Image (tube, helix red, strand yellow):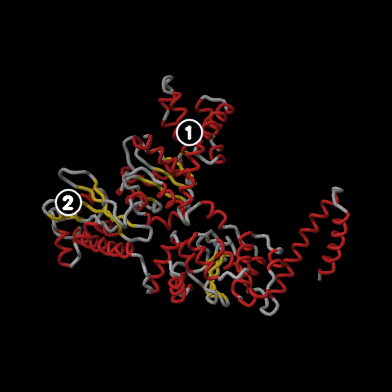
Amino acid sequence: MARDEIEEVRERLDIVDVIGDYLRLNRSGRNFRALCPFHSERTPSFYVSPERQTWHCFGCGRGGDVFSFVMEQEGLSFPEALRLLAERAGVTLKARQADKGAKDLYDIMNEAHAFYRKQIQAVGAEAARAYLARRGIDTKRAMLFELGWAPQGWDGLKRHFSTRGIPLRQAVQAGLLVEGDRGTYDRFRGRILFPIKDVRGRVIALGGRIISGDGAKYINSPESPIYSKRSSLYLLNAAKKSMREKGKAILVEGYMDALKLHLEGFTETVATLGTSLTEEQAALLKRFCEQCLICYDADIAGQEAAIRGMYLLQRAGLDIRVVALPEGMDPDDLVSADDGRKKFEELLEMAVPLPLFHIAAKRSELADETRVNGARREIIEGLAGLPVLEANRYLPEVARRLGLLLPELLRILEKARESMGAKDHKDRRIRENVPAESRQENKSDKTPADPLESAVCYLVWTDPKLRATLSPEGVLALLSDEVVQSIVAALLQGEDPAQLENRWHETGESRPMAVLAAGGAHLEEYDEETRLDVLLSALKRRKEQRRFRFLKEKKARGEASMEEIREFADLAKALKGGSR
Ligand SMILES: [Zn+2]
């Protein structure tokens, strides 16, 4: 990431325009105000400052610049947000060669998708339309979900690409054409196509369902430079807003299930792409919600691989509930039936926490003397992989259902944790390597900044003269927030703000920018001439008050030294004199 590129994007964009695309902004003095999109509220406490080009929410403490807003809102990493905003600003990023190739693949995929979408309305697609109609998808709905049709025959797309001058080599790379002994031919033939998009809404792959004849029921695009099956979910882009609003996701297996649930108003639904769940998918879901309701066919949900995948999501910090579907029914069947929507809602309400579901799935093994030990072990291993607090919630219930006494269960669980310790440690390391998505970072990120400290931080950040004259020792001793301390310390040691910011972007830290944005907002309450003095003396006074209370307690317990008693008396005098 080149710093001048980031600067150029920032300069060309107005934060008010960008945020205005997402929220209804109302002018309020020098700022704009809106209902915060990141926490629920009735009176707006979300402010955008055109002067500082920052945003800050007094309600939940989030804030930052135009990049951090887009990151939060769209659930993007910094490089992704940079690309998105660069496009908007018309800045061409000096992308690496690999990225340049990738851009072409997006275009090619888009072109193919447009071609297939046209086909579904054309002559020759009658069978496809009839098939969809039988499944409750009329043409209007098919268009809404941008479904396509790959005609029978071997070279429909290939010929289309040839007339458009698209290099066939790259179409092969995108997985749209296949290289065979006798030349290239279309991968998708006689199939209804579902577009698979990334989190930004770009088509990255296609899933094709056959409607007649031999062949696999589904074939999907192969992995490509722009498509990784492990880190994609069908309809994620369409579901993300709803997932954030509702705080949960519904996870199903099939394209058709996901689509039908969206049509019935369950717009927080996404589908896996015929694979077991992955760390990457867990991280994606975690960007938008806390809870995940898993809704698989009964016979699949109980399988080992499926349960392992669910625990993987739970380890990523999602609250996993499993929805029990009636035997032999999938979500599509359910919502298609009379009253289906209401029935499905009821099933969602009754979803059970994962460990309890696991016990239910192992019911027959638990009742079988020869298999009970193995089944118990698996359940306990699953529990041991969870964060302790999370697992504790289920222990009494689990003990009862496994026929163990609570202390017994605790002892076995402890042992399982120990033997898993090493492996889990490795898992966590892998997870934390994923930039901007690690959980710890998110948590501490949301700690609201102290108004006084962040205001001082903002002053030091924006005023080079101040940085040259302020004494580090004096200021740092007054600060208690570690992030504020480290920003101020770095600046007073002569580090350049732009450099610091670049480093935060690279490491994926977002709290520093939130602290600075909060500081800028708080600073508005102060008079420009006197604000530094006022802030520093307020901080000094607060520090003295803390010390005063500490010494007072110590004195009361009879533990204060002579020196401390003297200090206490001095402080009492100073605090009294200072109060107006
Ligand atoms: Zn907020």
**Which of these two is toward me, 20 or 287?**
287
Name the residue located 46 percent from the left edge and 56 percent from the top edge: 435
Quadrant location of residue 43? bottom right
**Which of these two is toward me, 393 or 437?**
437
Name the residue located 16 percent from the left edge and 46 percent from the top edge: 212
**Which of these two is toward me, 333 or 404?**
404
Q: Seen in the image, is 483 located left or right of residue 432?
A: right
Task: State yes or no: Cβ of the residue under disc 2 lies below 8 Å from any atom of ligand 1.
Answer: no
Residue 157, percent from left and from top? 17, 59
Ligand 1: quadrant of the figure:
bottom right
Q: Seen in the image, is 375 located left or right of residue 212?
A: right
Q: Amino acid at mark 2?
A: Gly
Mark 2 lies on residue: 190
Q: Name the quadrant of the C terminus.
A: bottom right
Question: Are the residues at dot 1 and dot 2 in contact (C-beta closer than 8 Å)?
Answer: no
Residue 556, percent from left and from top? 85, 50
